[in-house]
Image: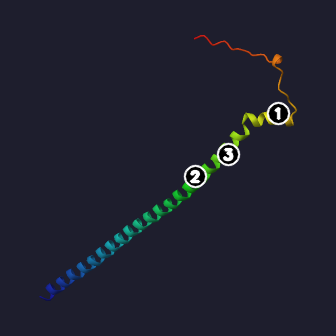
Amino acid sequence: MNSGVGSIGALVFERSKRGKFRRVVATLCIIAGLLLYVGGKVKIMRLGYQIEALEHEKQELERANGSLRIEASSLASPARIEEIATKRLGMVRPLKENIVIVKRNAPKQ
């Protein structure tokens, strides 16, 4: 009977050892899951901040593009080009008798 109690005691001891191992494994799995979850959330937040910064940069670039387009159209205006040609370069409009109009033939298809 003494050996029966020892066997039972040994079985109880093994079960408690297995139970501790299972608890440790379960705890490690829970911790690993939480770390993965928190890591994913941190990554999502970082990407959100990057998206926000890129959207802000895009808006600034669109504003700069708009002002550059306005500046380019004002620099290429025929009135401005004519003013520079006459005032700075000393050019004059040709007389009507010096103008020759060249007509192009339409390409045959």
Q: Residue at x 68, y 39 (%)?
A: 73
Q: At label 1, which amino acid type do we have?
A: Ala
Mark found first going from the N terminus, 3 or 1: 3
Q: Quadrant of the N terminus?
A: bottom left
Question: Which residue does the numbered mark 2 point to in the structure image?
Answer: 58
Q: Tell me the crowding category of disc 1: few under 14, some 14 to 19, or many 20 or more residues within 10 angstroms, Cα based.
A: some
Q: Is residue 16 above or below residue 96?
A: below
Residue 107 versus residue 11: which sits nearer the camera? 107
Q: Secondary structure at mark 2?
A: helix
Colour scheme shown: rainbow
Q: Secondary structure at mark 3?
A: helix
Cβ–Cβ below 8 Å for labels 3 and 1? no
Q: Tell me the crowding category of disc 3: few under 14, some 14 to 19, or many 20 or more residues within 10 angstroms, Cα based.
A: few
Residue 81 versus residue 96: which sits nearer the camera? 96
Say whether residue 19 is left or right of residue 5: right
Q: Secondary structure at mark 1?
A: helix
Q: Is residue 36 above or below residue 73?
A: below
The spot of residue 29 in percent (x, y) is 34, 69
The circle drawn on residue 68 is 3
Marks 3 and 1, how far apart at CA: 23 Å
Q: In the image, which is nearer the foreground, mark 3 or mark 1?
A: 1
In the image as oriented, which residue stretches furthest toward the top? Answer: 108
Question: Which residue does the numbered mark 1 point to in the structure image?
Answer: 85
Quarter of the rendering containing residue 12: bottom left
Q: In the image, which is nearer the foreground, mark 3 or mark 2?
A: 3
Q: Residue at x 77, y 35 (%)?
A: 81
Q: In the image, which is nearer the foreground, mark 1 or mark 2?
A: 1
Q: At label 2, which amino acid type do we have?
A: Lys
Mark found first going from the N terminus, 3 or 2: 2
